[in-house]
Amino acid sequence: MTCSNNLFLLFSLFCLLCPSHAAANNELHQLLSFNSLLSDSTQLPNWSKSTKLCDFTGVTCNTNSSVLSIDLSNKNLNLDFQKVSSFLLTLPNLQTLLLKNSNVTGKLILLAGIQCSPVLTKLDLSKNSISGPISYIYSLSSCMKLKSLNLSRNFVEYPASNSKGLSFNLESLDLSYNNIIGPSFMPWLLSRGCSELVHLSLKGNKLAGSLVHLQDCKNLKFLDLSTNNFSTRVPKFNDFKALNHLDLSSNKFYGDISDSLSTCKKLTFLNITHNQFGGEEVPLFPSGNLKYLYLSANDFQGSLPNHLSHMCLSLVELDVSFNSLSGYVPESFAACSSLELFDISHNNFSGKLPIDTLVKLSSLKKMLFGFNSFVGGLSESFGKMTNLETLDVSSNLLNGSVPVGICQDPRNILKVFYLQNNEFTGPIPDSLGNCSKLESLDLSFNYLDGTIPSSLGSLSNLRDLILWLNQLHGLIPEELMYIKTLKNLILDFNVLSGSIPSSLSNCSSLKWISLSNNQLSGEIPASFGQLTYLAILKLGNNSLTGSIPSELGNCRSLVWMDLNTNLLNGTIPPALFKQSGNIVGGLLTEEPYGYVKNDGIKECHGSGNLLEFRGIRQEQLNRISTRYPCNFTRVYRGITEPTFYNNGSIIFLDLSYNKLEGGLPKELGSMYYVEVLNLGHNDLSGLIPQELGKMRYTAILDLSYNRLNGSIPSTLTGLKNLGDMDLSNNLLSGLIPESAPFDTLPEYRFLNNTGLCGYPLPQCGSGASTKSGEQNKKSSHRTLSLAGIVAMGLSFSLLCIFGLLIIAAETRKWMNNKKAVLEGAGEAVSINLATFEKPLLKI
């Protein structure tokens, strides 16, 4: 018994002293020490002594129970890289370390004496906050077998302090979306050779200059240089026999792309969108393996060449949009049985839609033919394309009726149906209710009549119902209440009548309700206050009665409210502004909008009209003129960006041309971010509250044609962004404040206030006609001299209006490569209310 016990003890002692057991203990100690550094212990709750090492979250072991890989992606480590590397990179058998989006900070430097795992092959530090010069990569030189390094979406910079360049043992390097700038980076990066490099991504920096050193990277399979500042001839890829993915998009490359790629027989992905290729026909590309070909936004001319159809055995996606192509779609494309995306939008194609060719594309999912000059009707045969998810023929010259049988086959999976900006007539067919997968329906800017079919209420996946500028009449169907997914209901410029269904509040996802310029009556439903996500409410130019529901103050996401030109009465409820400062912003981004500024003529009421503008030709806005008595010399276009990252409030409030009475609530001052406030042409009375001076971002303020009395509060001089203010036709008295912005406003903005005096009106206490005449002359001269400033101020103020203009939240992938190229005469405008840096374009 004693002998056996001794043997057991000796065996146990041997096991404790054996190398593998000691190594496991060391690894356990390292990981526990690492976990003790975390400020949030809930990130790795089972990294404890009571858990086996190989059961730790994110840890994978080999057969000897030694740590082989660690994946802590999306954990909030909140640690400096030096601390991370000291405890994790030094694990002796670690091959893979994944720390993507883990809040790792600091510079890419190892502490002195730290030795990287000798078998580490992959390190992913993407989506963190690592900073410093790119040359700090040298600190990883002790990682002798490192093959894959991902530093994308950090803050790595260039120039580098070390001019030697990298010696590439790496096979994969991703430096996309950093702060790497300038023409000398590429020579530095590649100067010591790159023969082992297989994957290189430098997307989303500001690189420029020569790519001559790239010729040495002959083993590259994946190369992404997109979204930089390269302005050079496209490099030669003749010796790149293995290249299968090449992205040069969003640069200024030029030259003969066909010659550069002629020997790249293994190429499967090619994206050259948004460059300066073209001036001639679409070039010849290597055929046989090419699956994804994106040629958008260059200047390719002529017809769609037959040699593109020769790729049909492999081609899956073809995008030639935003070029200058014309003619017809060749019949040879009928052989493209693998084609899923066919985008020829924003060109000059004409003739009838090639339905006989298209119905043979059995795999086609997305057909994007918008912004061309196709004529004729829309064939019922489209109903036979059962795999079609997106059918977009917007902004053409199509006519006739909307096909009744578009979803005649129960196998149809149509999700996006865009017919806007054509010449369709007749009713909206009830059979659209059979398109059970439909998510977005846009029939706007046509000549459709009849009523809105109640069958649309059965579309349980519908997010966008956009029917503006038609000749629809009748009631808004109550059945729309059943569409729980509905986010955008845009029915402006029709002849709809009756009341607004209060049951629309059941559509709890609604973000945009636009019913303006109809013949609606009754009251504004108080139940709209239940719409938590409602951002835009447009009900202007109707015959709505009753008071403004105070419940609308519960709409915590409301940024745009336009109720102008109705028959609303009662007072402005103070509760309307109780959510100011509490908005979660950035709900909808990167969507196109249009805004028509009120030109000031008598018949043109309100401050302006917000337009849903996807798929509409700007030059055809004159169609609205019969329904909206404003000229269209001032149209603003842009792309929305989030602006309220922490909090916000209403940025546009127009209650003008109603019958509102009572005083101005002091709570108006809580609208810190309001850009346009128009309360003109009502029956408001009492004093102007001092609190209005808190509206720091106000660009347009209209209180004209009311019965306001007392003096102009001096606090209004704090409105530094004010470009236009109208206080005319009230009962105001006293001295006009003698500072900006009042000293830049013309005289007519203060007229018909019998008690007001001071510049630009006659001086206070002056009754002499000569002095008055001199003052008026001086005022006129001052007004003329400041006309340019005021005009600039107006344009500048309109920039501020659109920081959170919001339409459909849903991404439409076909716009991703196009949003920088807007229709008509113009340029892409990214608008950010927080910066006021980029001017709106006046068309």
Image (cartoon, rainbow, N blue to C red):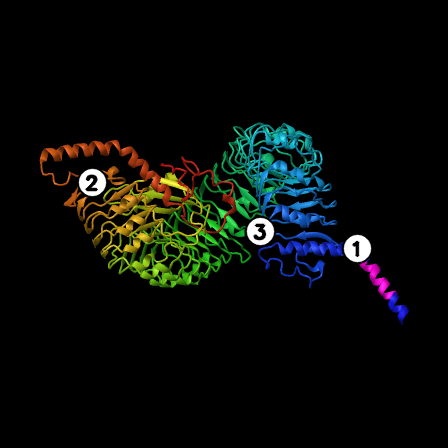
Residue depicted at x 56% and y 51%: 387
Residue depicted at x 67% and y 48%: 86
Q: Earlier in the sequence, mark 2 or mark 1?
A: 1
Mark 1: few/some/many CA within 10 Å (<14, 14-19, 20+): some
Q: Do the residues labelled 3 and 2 touch (CB within 8 Å)?
A: no
Q: Quadrant of residue 243?
A: top right
On residue 748, the disc is: 2
- Name the residue at the left extreme: 768
- Magenta residues, start to end: 7-16
Magenta segment's dominant SS is helix
Residue 731: % across, % down: 17, 49
On residue 365, the disc is: none
On residue 20, the disc is: 1
* Residue 402 visible from this viewpoint: no
- Residue closest to the eye, 11 or 692: 11
Question: Which element carries disc 2, helix, strand or loop?
Answer: helix
Residue 25 counted in the magenta span: no
Q: Which amino acid does label 2 sit on?
A: Tyr
Q: Which amino acid does label 3 sit on?
A: Asn
Calculate the distance from the C-alpha at mark 2 to the C-alpha at mark 1. Answer: 90 Å
Q: From the image, tell me which residue sits under label 3.
A: 78
